[in-house]
Image (tube, rainbow, N blue to C red):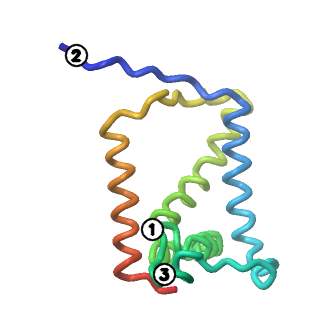
Amino acid sequence: MSGPRLRAVRLGKVEVALAALVAASALASARLHPLWEGLVYTRCPLLTLVGIPCVICGGTRALVALVTGDAIEALAWNPLVALGGLAALGWLPLATLMLVGWLEPPRIPTVLPVVGRRAIVAGLALNWGYLLLWFRG
């Protein structure tokens, strides 16, 4: 007996373009961080109120380190955000190729399999555990 068949839908050009816009915006805002650093309060509310870092604490510093070329520093600040930033950097050229029609957009499952959901929870838990033990902020 086999399990339920997973459905997947192909991303359209609008979704590809929106994902590229989000990735580019995050990377650009990190690159322009010196311009807005003193204007926006970026301290984590959980860290401020309770004294423990949240799962994305250090994310701004991680992205700033990544876009300035220091991947090791980015990983030290927040491994999950750093890896997400690397994924965003990789997505931009792929999205461009998809938008011009040279590459087929990916198919995305409509329901994430149990193993995928468990991997996400495990990744978040490991990242948070790392931050609880070694947060530098």
Residue highlighted by disc 3: 50
10 Å crowding of disc 3: few (<14), some (14-19), many (20+): few
Image quarter for residue 68?
Answer: bottom right
User: Of discs 3 and 1, which sits in the foreground?
Assistant: 3
Residue lying farthest front? 49
Whole-percent x and y of residue 132? 38, 78
Q: CA distance from mark 3 to mark 2?
A: 47 Å
- The answer to whether residue 53 is above or below residue 122 is below
- Please, what secondary structure does the residue beneath circle 1 have? helix
Circles 3 and 1: CB atoms closer than 8 Å: no
Amino acid type, residue under disc 3 in the picture: Val
Q: CA distance from mark 3 to mark 1?
A: 22 Å
- The answer to whether residue 129 is above or below residue 3 is below
Residue highlighted by disc 1: 79
Whole-percent x and y of residue 20? 69, 46
Whole-percent x and y of residue 89? 61, 55
The residue under the point 55% across, 30% down is 106
The earlier-in-sequence mark between 3 and 2 is 2
Residue 2 is labelled as 2
51 lies left or right of 104? left
Q: CA distance from mark 2 to mark 1?
A: 37 Å
Circles 2 and 1: CB atoms closer than 8 Å: no
The earlier-in-sequence mark between 2 and 1 is 2
- Please, what secondary structure does the residue beneath circle 2 have? loop
Amino acid type, residue under disc 1 in the picture: Pro
Residue lying farthest top? 1
